[in-house]
Image: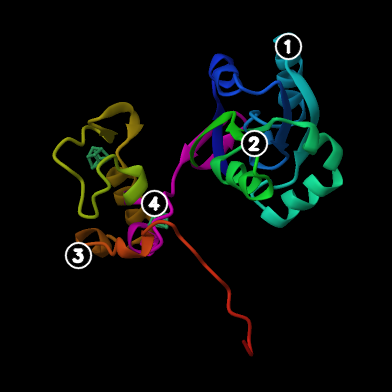
Amino acid sequence: MIITTSKPFEEVLKELEGAKSVFLIGCSSCAATCETGGEPQVAEMKAKLEAEGKTVTGAGVYEEVCHELNTKRKFRENKEAVDAADGFLVMCCGAGCQSVREATEKPVHPACNTMFLGNIARLGNFNEKCSLCGDCVLEEFGAICPVTRCHKGILNGPCGGTDDGKCETDREKDCAWTLIYNQLEKEGRLDLYEKIHTVKNWQVSMKPGRVVFQKEGE
Ligand code: SF4
Ligand code: SF4
């Protein structure tokens, strides 16, 4: 899931300085789970903006705002309110925001900061465990990612700072390499821990990423 946090309301207001009217967009997928862009947050934002003298021409909480065709379709369905807005406030991730960018030529404003691809430990508690490197090496590390979960992202760890299973950069965090060692030991695969890993192929994670599925016969 994409983890987002809400920008401070003052920052949102500043973004909307030039807009008298605005259309609000939330996302019922990740942003709803993060409580940054679900129905309650969009309703709250609407009330706060109206209290500041803004006209909210419409609001919608769409399923996966990052789905560009779907977002364009929603805009067509809400044409009147969309056309009446000076701009759009998007309460979800940066991908969703840029989906809205494709659907309108008017100003698009982000209401959230996009943090990372996250695992849900429990609601309101998210952890980054994969940083989308494009060349997954989990097989070699007991399915615990050193690229993401080690602060230094080293493939031949641990570093000299590991201390009693904790990371030198943050005593609250487990050293990824202790986790990897413990897991490989459980699996009887400590030979993998001894392996020297060569330089990772970072070329596959060049930005912007693009994947196009080829259908048979094409
Ligand atoms: S190696 Fe780590 S960052 Fe790369 S795809 Fe696998 S889990 Fe994600
Ligand atoms: S202490 Fe462990 S997790 Fe922290 S940087 Fe060193 S090897 Fe990585």
Q: Which residue corresponds to mark 4?
A: 144
Q: CA distance from mark 2 to mark 1?
A: 26 Å
Mark 2 or mark 3, whichever is nearer to me: 2
The answer to whether residue 42 is above or below residue 191 is above
Circle 4 Cα neighbour tier, 10 Å, few/some/many (<14 / 14–19 / ≥20): many
Viewer-nearest residue: 15 or 215 = 15
**Labelled pair 1, 4 in contact (Cβ < 8 Å):** no
Position of 143 compared to 66: left or right?
left
Q: Is mark 1 within 8 Å of ligand 1?
A: no
User: Which tag, 1 or 4, sits closer to the chain's start?
Assistant: 1
Which element type, helix, strand or loop, lies under badge 2? helix
Give yes or no for residue 123 being in the magenta stretch: yes
Q: Which mark is residue 198?
A: 3
Q: Which residue corresponds to mark 1?
A: 53
Circle 2 Cα neighbour tier, 10 Å, few/some/many (<14 / 14–19 / ≥20): many
Viewer-nearest residue: 198 or 173 = 198
Mark 4 or mark 2, whichever is nearer to me: 2
Q: Which residue corresponds to mark 2?
A: 31
Mark 3 or mark 4, whichever is nearer to me: 3
User: Which tag, 2 or 1, sits closer to the chain's start?
Assistant: 2
**Residue 137's spot in the image, x, y percent?**
36, 62
Which element type, helix, strand or loop, lies under badge 4? loop
**Labelled pair 3, 4 in contact (Cβ < 8 Å):** no
Magenta residues (range): 117-146
User: Which tag, 3 or 1, sits closer to the chain's start?
Assistant: 1
Which element type, helix, strand or loop, lies under badge 3? loop
Label 4 is placed on what type of residue? Answer: Ile
Which element type, helix, strand or loop, lies under badge 1? loop
The quarter in which the N terminus is drawn is top right
Label 3 is placed on what type of residue? Answer: Thr
Instruction: Look at 28% across and 46% down and name the residue there.
Output: 177
Mark 2 or mark 1, whichever is nearer to me: 1
